[in-house]
Amino acid sequence: MAFFHAYRFTHFVDKAAEKTEQSSNLSAFEKGKTLLLGVNNPRPENNELPLQAFQNITLKSNRSIACWHIKTNHSKGTVILFHGYGGQKSTMLDKSNKFIKLGYSTLLVDFMGSGGSEGNQTTIGFLEAAQVKTCFNYLKDQGESPIYLFGTSMGAVAILKAIKDYSISPKAIILECPFGSMYETVGARFKMMNVPIFPIAGFLVFWGGVQNGYWAFSHNPKEYAKSISCPTLLLYGAQDLKVSRREIKEIYANLNGKKKLKIYLEAGHENYLIKYQKQWLADVQNFLLQNS
């Protein structure tokens, strides 16, 4: 059960397949079926294009990854945007538009397994960290400066791991709701279904790592945070059922550079522009002004 569940969690299926609903919308029978067989996740595809002129870019990393580069006249710098699990670069367009209005160019990225990038596999930020490094180095080689990194959920985790593993040096980073560890994020999904976390979550983490070529129990953003010395803005929704406040506090405590934590009281694990657009924009703008 854990073997197949782990595989389906880390490998997307053909986009024509029907996606499994959120656990909160499932009946008891459907929850049991999902627990036994795993979730069905169609491969994320881009369903929208930028409003601005953009350049399609394909970069060679540990996978071939597709990007949109949107350049702004008299740019204050470039923000690279990394999406979350089950997302794609088009889901970051609304935030890209905000950064562009603030005077920044943007680079929107499809992680491996999503959109125009290679494969159907996701490793929840582990192998994706190398793709963060590739994007950063691409802009650096183009002479663009300063470079900022923005990531939500899995994208935030990949940023933390990239800085820890590859010593890249962005001007500053903005992180939305990164999970504390692989085990905790898997456990949270069982908790949402009112299913005991032990021992199934551990089996799933084990097999997920084996299938994807790494030791998943060592995938701990809380530890990666100890390697961060650049300015960091950490954003979190207090109603988040997938990431606990304890995880956020531990990540925040481990950050070594200049840091700021903002909590949106009525937001969950979602796009913060839905409920807190003005506050999000003010928080991000102030952070960028202070770290320009």
Image (cartoon, grey):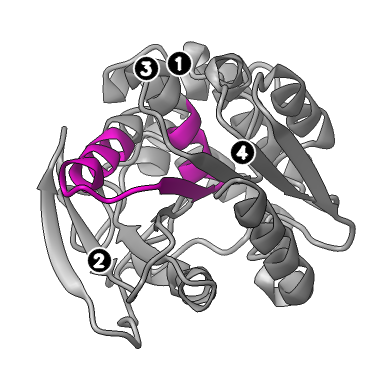
> Label 4 sits on what residue type?
Pro
The residue at 74%/67% (across/down) is 282
Spatial CA span between label 4 and label 2: 25 Å
- Left or right of 240 on screen, residue 266: right
Q: Nearer the viewer, residue 158 or 279?
A: 279
Residue that label 2 marks: 69
Q: CA distance from mark 3 to mark 4?
A: 17 Å
Q: Earlier in the sequence, mark 3 or mark 1?
A: 3
**Residue at the extreme front of the image, as rendered:** 74
Q: Which residue is mark 4?
A: 178
Range covered by the magenta-colored residues? 131-160
In the image, what residue occupies the spot 89% across and 57% down?
265
- Asked if the stretch drawn in magenta spans residue 139, the answer is yes
Mark earlier in primary sequence (1, 2): 2
Identified at 43% across, 55% down, the residue is 86
Residue 206 circle label? 1
Select label 1 or label 4 by which is in front. Answer: 4
